[in-house]
Image (spheres, grey):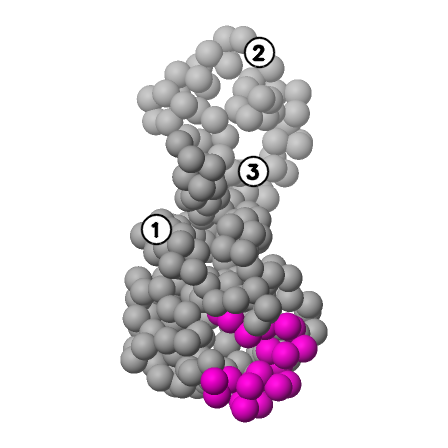
């Protein structure tokens, strides 16, 4: 496998690692910035109807992250300049599964005449951009975007090809991230309900390992530590005979 092939394989692996461990999205983005010869990158959302953006640091969703941008630049982008983004003027050019670059969205010859470039892009030393549009609904899009200075030149077909090859993996990774996030939220809500119950409740998996026990169960265990306890992630009795009976009950359940 070529060096370029190894680099792309690593990017694909990083996407799925990030989907399972959201704190790794920023690591993937840094790798993408490097692989495409960029200086900055961002995974962000845009609302076409409200002309608002969702960026890193302004949401609890770790999917939204950035590389190379200062917190001040992101705050300015969210508060004002996101609505002036000339590359978002024509929503019809933003379709799910497509890779776009700046010239496709707004003529480069006009870019320097815009307030967006003069007041926000120029201070970040950004002129060229390219984006993988992972998701698109009538109102919103979710994008992985990379940017670089004018001196670096426009994105090559090879660099755009990296985004195109990653597209199906990005879409799957984004969907998996959201699915797991929603499941975590449901699990959190369920355990919160259990913690409000007056009865002691312990949840065990099919092997008998303890997954969760509510507040009342913890109180009961603390008060009966000489008879029943949690050891090695399992409920155990201090007396062998009772412990065998408990294990049999768990297996039967």
Residue 165 is marked as 1
Question: Which residue matches tag 2?
Answer: 239
Of the image marks 3 and 2, the number of the one nearer the N terminus: 3
166 or 16, nearer to the observer: 166
The segment highlighted magenta reads 109-129
Q: Quadrant of residue 100?
A: bottom left
- Residue 192: x percent and y percent? 51, 53
> Is residue 123 among what the camera can see?
yes
Label 2 Cα crowd, 10 Å radius (few <14 / some 14-19 / many 20+)? few
Q: Quadrant of residue 136?
A: bottom left
Q: Residue furthest top?
A: 241
Q: Who's the residue at 55% across and 74% down the image?
A: 127
Residue 156 is marked as none
Question: Which residue matches tag 3?
Answer: 217
Q: Specify whether residue 126 is painted magenta.
A: yes
Eyeballing the image, is 54 above or below 62?
A: below
Q: Nearer the viewer, mark 2 or mark 1?
A: 1
Mark count: 3
Tell me the distance, in whole angstroms, between the alpha carbons under discs 1 and 3: 50 Å
- In the picture, measured across the screen, residue 217 lies left or right of residue 106, that is right
Q: Specify whether residue 111 is painted magenta.
A: yes
């Amino acid at each position: 496998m070529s060096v370029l092939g190894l680099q792309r394989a690593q990017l694909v692996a990083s996407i799925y690692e990030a989907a399972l461990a959201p704190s790794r999205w920023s690591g993937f983005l840094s790798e993408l910035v490097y692989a495409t010869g960029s200086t900055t990158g961002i995974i962000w959302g845009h609302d076409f109807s409200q002309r608002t953006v969702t960026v890193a640091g302004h949401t609890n969703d770790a999917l939204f992250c950035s590389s190379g941008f200062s917190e001040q630049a992101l705050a300015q982008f969210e508060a004002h300049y996101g609505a002036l983004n000339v590359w978002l003027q024509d929503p019809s050019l933003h379709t799910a599964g497509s890779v776009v670059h700046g010239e496709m969205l707004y003529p480069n010859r006009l870019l320097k005449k815009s307030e967006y470039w003069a007041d926000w892009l120029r201070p970040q030393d950004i002129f060229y951009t390219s984006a993988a549009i992972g998701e698109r609904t009538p109102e919103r899009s979710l994008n992985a975007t990379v940017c670089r200075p004018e001196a670096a030149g426009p994105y090559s077909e090879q660099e755009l090809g990296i985004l195109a090859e990653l597209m199906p993996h990005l879409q799957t990774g984004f969907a998996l991230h959201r699915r797991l996030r929603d499941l975590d939220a449901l699990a959190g809500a369920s355990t919160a309900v259990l913690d409000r119950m007056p009865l002691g409740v312990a949840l065990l998996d099919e092997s008998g390992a303890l997954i969760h026990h509510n507040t009342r169960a913890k109180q009961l265990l603390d008060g009966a530590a000489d008879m029943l306890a949690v050891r090695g992630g399992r409920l155990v009795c201090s007396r062998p005979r009772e412990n065998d009976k408990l294990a049999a009950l768990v297996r039967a359940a």
